Image (cartoon, rainbow, N blue to C red):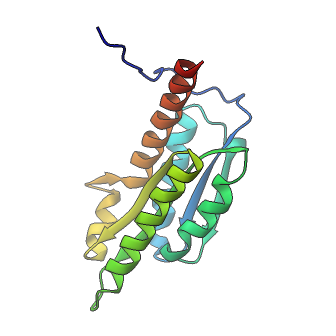
Amino acid sequence: MHKEIKPNSQQLESANSSCVAVVVSQYNDQITSKLCHGAIETLVQGGISREKIVIARVPGAWELPFATQRLVATRNVAGVIALGAVIKGETSHDQHINRAVSSALMQLSLDHNKPIAFGLLTVNNLEQALHRSGGNKGNKGQECAQALLECLRLGKALDEYDE
């Protein structure tokens, strides 16, 4: 017989001393501001008090790992949501940014043993970005916040298993 570790489906307690950070790119702000709003509202609905949500704004997607690294290195940040939008242009510049940022964020999560939700839209055009920031494809900021909450709950269940 096997044992399955399941996260507690209850809301996270706001009394927790840890914060959750949202790192958001200012580039393509008409998209990223909607992602950020969706993430914050989902975190609050999930039991994180607004006072425990830290928002760090960076110039563009390239800078997401920098701020994320600084935040996950602090003891009082339980996890990070990284939000941005890279829209394909005439060159392959977008591919290099997307690959580097996604690899860096994954490595930071593993190095610091903290969840980092990947909310970097990697789209071909503005229309696709609009659809993924509250349009007919949902809001990636909300999805990332839900994933982060689930990972925080799972982390708590794994900590309890380890004891």
Is 80 displayed left or right of 147 in the figure?
A: right
Q: Residue at x 36, y 65 (%)?
A: 121
The front one of 10 and 74 is 74
Q: Quadrant of residue 22?
A: bottom right
Q: Residue at x 72, y 28 (%)?
A: 15
Task: Determine the residue located farthest toward the bottom in the rendered image.
Answer: 90
Residue sitting farthest toward the top: 1
**Image location (x, y in percent) of residue 129:** 32, 68
- Along the viewing direction, whichever of 96 and 25 lies nearer the viewer: 96
Residue 137 in the image: above or below residue 76: below
Residue 5 on image: x %, y %: 41, 20
Kindly tell me whether residue 55 is visible in this rendering.
Answer: yes
84 or 74, which lies in front? 74
Left or right relative to 48: residue 93: left
Does residue 52 appear left or right of residue 151 in this picture?
right
Residue at 53% x, 44% y is: 41
Residue 148 location in percent, x, y? Answer: 48, 42
Observer able to see residue 11: no
User: Is residue 94 or residue 102 the one in the foreground?
Assistant: 102
Residue at image point 56% right, 45% down: 114
Is residue 43 positioned above or below 71 on the image? above
Percent of width and height locating residue 70: 67, 61
